[in-house]
Amino acid sequence: VRGDIIQAIELGSADKLIAFCGGIQKYSPVDSFAAPEPWDMPGYADKIIMAAGTFVQGASIEFSADGPLRAPYNVYLQGGLTFEHAIIGIMGAAQAVLDLDETD
């Protein structure tokens, strides 16, 4: 039985990690127009990408995804105030990864 709210998803490439986070951001309630970019966050050895269209900065319980740009390119998906919103965001993020695969 799970008791946490974080799901690790192995994407296998930096491009897929960036696409997934972009899809999450696109379907977020705040700043859906923004495109998350990897950056050198203090305290981390690798670039980090974060998607969080939340009402309170840093409120991961609302809906967010983040991960370091290093193999195996895991994204850590968390939160979602409602089931419906989480499904819409996850499906949008999955579609962004599939779209990326179609262009390869």
Image (spheres, rainbow, N blue to C red):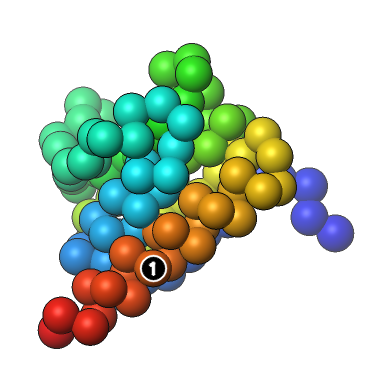
Name which residue type carries label 1.
Gln
Furthest residue toward right = 1
Q: Work out whether residue 47 or residue 22 is closer to the camera in this orientation and state it.
A: 22
Can residue 5 be seen here? The reply is yes
Quarter occupied by residue 69: bottom left
At a point 60% along the width and 48% down the height, the residue shown is: 86
Helix, strand or loop for disc 1: helix
Quarter occupied by residue 45: top left
Residue 53 vs 4, above or below: the answer is above
Can residue 67 be seen here? The reply is no
Expressed as whole percent of the image width and height from the top left, the position of residue 4 reads 71, 45
At a point 60% along the width and 44% down the height, the residue shown is: 85
Q: Quadrant of the N terminus?
A: bottom right
Expressed as whole percent of the image width and height from the top left, the position of residue 62 reads 58, 31
Q: Which residue is mark 1?
A: 95
Disc tally is: 1
Q: Is residue 69 left or right of residue 77?
A: left
Q: Is residue 29 left or right of residue 6?
A: left
Q: Quadrant of the C terminus?
A: bottom left
Disc 1 packing (10 Å; few <14; some 14–19; many ≥20): some
At a point 21% along the width and 26% down the height, the residue shown is: 42
Expressed as whole percent of the image width and height from the top left, the position of residue 97 reads 32, 69
Expressed as whole percent of the image width and height from the top left, the position of residue 66 reads 38, 45
At a point 43% along the width and 58% down the height, the residue shown is: 92
